[in-house]
């Protein structure tokens, strides 16, 4: 699968779940109880859409360019927090990088959920 396609993941209060969308394919969306689940479902759906496009000799849309962001940034934190994160990642059986990505995604999801709740009130 072409991994150059982008995904947007947001929490939906209405659906009470995370929704992942691929902007290059407007009809593609998938749901999940977690951001990771929604992304996994959307990735699977994308694979199917790409296969369908190819089977019908349809031209695939160009992947969205993300020139502004490298996907990397450096964060300085206290040694004690670094240790706590590394130890928890080890208990979870994942890399520190994967663990921190998950924490950030969950935090952003909660923040977006709060914003949407605040805007309704």
Image (cartoon, rainbow, N blue to C red):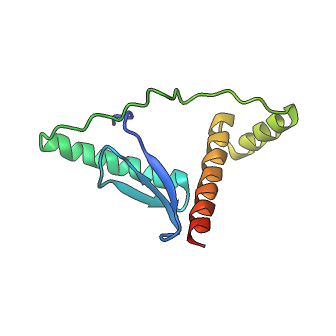
Compared to residue 2, the image places residue 23 above or below, namely: below
Q: Extreme left residue here? A: 57
| Front residue of 20 and 42 | 20
Question: In which quarter of the view is residue 99 placed?
Answer: top right
Question: In which quarter of the view is residue 84 placed?
Answer: top right
Residue placed at 35% from the left, 35% from the top? 64
Question: In which quarter of the view is residue 2 placed?
Answer: top left
Q: Is residue 56 left or right of residue 71?
A: left
Q: Is residue 22 left or right of residue 120?
A: left
- Tell me the quadrant of the picture where the C terminus can be found: bottom right
- Tell me the quadrant of the picture where the N terminus can be found: top left
Residue 74 in the image, given as x and y percentages of width and height: 68, 27
Residue placed at 62% from the left, 39% from the top? 98
Residue placed at 32% from the left, 45% from the top? 47
Residue placed at 43% from the left, 45% from the top? 7
Residue 113 in the image, given as x and y percentages of width and height: 59, 61
| Front residue of 23 and 97 | 23
Compared to residue 69, the image places residue 55 above or below, namely: below
Number of numbered discs overlaid on the protein picture:
0
Residue 110 in the image, given as x and y percentages of width and height: 63, 58
Q: Extreme right residue here? A: 80
| Front residue of 120 and 4 | 120
Compared to residue 47, the image places residue 113 above or below, namely: below
Residue 16 in the image, given as x and y percentages of width and height: 53, 69
């Amino acid at each position: 699968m072409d991994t150059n396609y982008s995904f947007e993941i947001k929490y939906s209060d209405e659906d009470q779940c995370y929704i992942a969308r691929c902007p290059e394919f407007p009809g593609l969306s998938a749901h999940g109880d977690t951001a990771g689940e929604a992304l996994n479902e959307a990735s699977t759906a994308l694979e199917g859409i790409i296969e369908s496009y190819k089977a019908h000799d349809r031209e695939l849309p160009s992947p969205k360019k993300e020139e502004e962001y490298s996907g990397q940034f450096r964060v300085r934190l206290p040694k004690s927090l670094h240790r706590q994160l590394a130890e928890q990642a080890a208990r979870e059986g994942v890399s520190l990088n994967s663990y921190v990505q998950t924490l950030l995604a969950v935090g952003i999801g909660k923040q977006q959920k709060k914003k949407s709740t605040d805007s309704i009130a």
